[in-house]
Amino acid sequence: MPHQCMNCGSVYPDEAEELMHGCSHCNSTLFLFTKDADPQDTDTLHEERDAVLEEIDAFLANVANTEDSHSHSIVFDLESIKIEEDGVYAINLRRLLEKLPLIVELKEGAYHIHLPSAFTQGEVSRFDVSTLEEKEEK
Amino acid sequence: MRNLLARLFSFFKKQQDISIGVYGPPNVGKTTLANRISSDLTGEELGSVSEIPHETREIQKKERMELQANANTLSFNLLDMPGISTKVDYRDFTEHGMEADAAKGRAKEATKGIVEAIKFLEEVDACLVVFDATEDPYTQVNITVLGNLEAKQIPIVIVANKIDGDNADPATIEEAFPQHPMVEISAKEGTNMEQLYDTVVHKLAH
């Protein structure tokens, strides 16, 4: 079973001297005990990845060939509203039109989930962007 | 007998409860149209109009209005919605001379208004979707909102407004969304309003 240096990623076999005295490349003494990669598992993963890529390619080709391709878009975003800067809001209409909780991205990677909107629709209309910002400032 | 009375009661209740929402992007003339309808039918206007986008940031409601065409009568509440857009930028307001702080406050209110307008789609029974006939109709807002209304099976009348504008081209709107009845109007001038009322009653009164 190999040992991988947690600092630089160099791999050493069992009973290697570096495991006692430190990595010959970076002198780190922290090693991760790793499992031997099974060649069969790797093949299966590659096959699955290729199948997914083929599926995405086929979907994109299909969208590009349709007459109304301009109305299609592939959306991976999470947020309903993104506060780009103070006073500038980007609104994800598709996300807002879905019956999902409101999610506001306050800054890169920081999200506020408006929980009342996840449970009762009536509460959504009371959503207030300014109160979210005040909470973030505190 | 009781069954008949219940059906009659539910018919009149349903007739009184019809809510018509006025939807569309900012600055297409939704409030000018709502004001025109409201003053034609009640003598009172509904909200203020401005060249600065997002003037309507809260839903404005006028209740108990009545339209008649041929032998049909339609009782309805009119809801003037905030304009729906995919971006609200305070700089669009400062361009019109507004102070930065006031513009940022307006941007927050406008964003909240968009959320309210979209969530209120659950409450409306029919929609007047307003387009600016001088602008390209193939926008993300128009396609997304109309697609969602169709999916919810909410009756739609498309209103091609601003036909008094120099570059007005309502035929492009009809071409883009031929599946819905369309009326070409100028809410500002009051052109073709009778045709709009006839179309609405024909589409919604049963």
Image (cartoon, coloured by chain):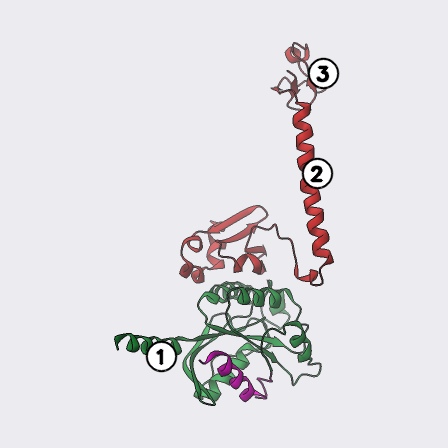
Chain colours: A red, B green
Q: Amino acid at mark 2?
A: Asp
Q: Which residues are magenta?
A: B184-206
Q: Helix, strand or loop at disc 3?
A: loop
Q: Which residue is mark 2?
A: A50
Residue B76: give x, y in percent of width and height: 43, 79
Residue sitting at x 34%, y 75%: B10
Q: Nearer the viewer, residue A10 or B64?
A: B64
- Name the residue nearer the viewer: B16 or A82: B16
Q: Could you say which is closer to the camera, residue B122 or residue A122?
A: B122
In the rendering, at what x and y percent does residue A46 appear? 69, 33
Q: Is residue A104 above or below residue B45?
A: above
Residue at x-position 69% and y-position 19%: A11
Q: Is residue A71 left or right of residue B3?
A: right
Q: Residue at x 43, y 87 (%)?
A: B42
Q: Is residue B152 magenta?
A: no
Q: Nearer the viewer, residue A71 or B203?
A: B203
Q: For the N terminus of chain B, give its image quadrant.
A: bottom left
